Image: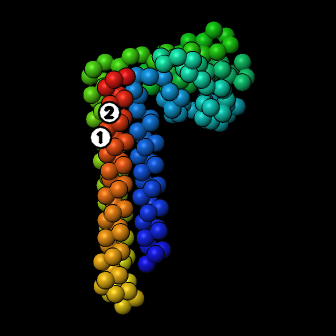
Amino acid sequence: MNSILKSCEEKMKQCLEATRHELTTLRTGKATLTLLEPVRVDYYGSKVPLNQVANLSVPDPRMILVSPWDAKQIVIIEKAIREANLGFNPANDGRVIRVPVPALTEERRKDLCKKAREFGEKGKVTIRHIRHESREAIEKKEKAKEISEDDRDLAWDKIQKMHDKHIEEIQHSVTKKESDIMEG
């Protein structure tokens, strides 16, 4: 029974982290390095993440600075940023690439908030699914007479508390992201 509870808790934590990570990919109007995570650069025949071919930094809230390790790659990196369709217009001066982060329009902010809620709902559905699977596993143990009804009820109660805690944390993360987007 403890292994089921431990597995349930672990899966819910992973789901929470995955949802939080998805939320970090949404623009808030402020420059963050996670905005360039989807960019893949053709580096000597293979596609690699941008952070494996350059140093990334945020010198101010509206600018991301990309400093390639190999100066010959600057044009390829700039092209990769453009082709990622993230809405950025990078410019290079021969040494570094400056990626200005434009301010978000009100309509775009609302779209991003909607997307944040979708990510949150997807996470909540996964949490509910994990709860359902765990309850079924406990029920099977009870039907096989491995645990008593009281143990089953106790386990179900613990699973429900884990569920409620993780759902609340997802909702909190979504609400925080929405406020970051709207104030951005």
User: Does residue 92 appear in the picture of this structure?
Assistant: yes
Residue 79: x and y in percent read 56, 20
Q: Residue at x 43, y 78 (%)?
A: 1
In percent of the image, x 32 and y 31: which residue is there?
A: 179
Q: Which residue is mark 2?
A: 178
For marks 2 and 1, give the CA distance.
Answer: 8 Å
Q: Position of residue 47 (x, y in %)?
A: 61, 35
| Amino acid residing under circle 1 | Arg
Q: Are marks 2 and 1 in contact (CB under 8 Å)?
A: yes
For residue 152, above or below residue 133: below
Mark 1, secondary structure of its residue: helix
Figure quadrant of the C terminus: top left
Q: Is residue 19 left or right of residue 77?
A: left
Q: Is residue 117 left or right of residue 43?
A: left
Q: Which residue is mark 1?
A: 117
Which residue is at a point 45% across and 48% down the rendered structure image?
Answer: 18
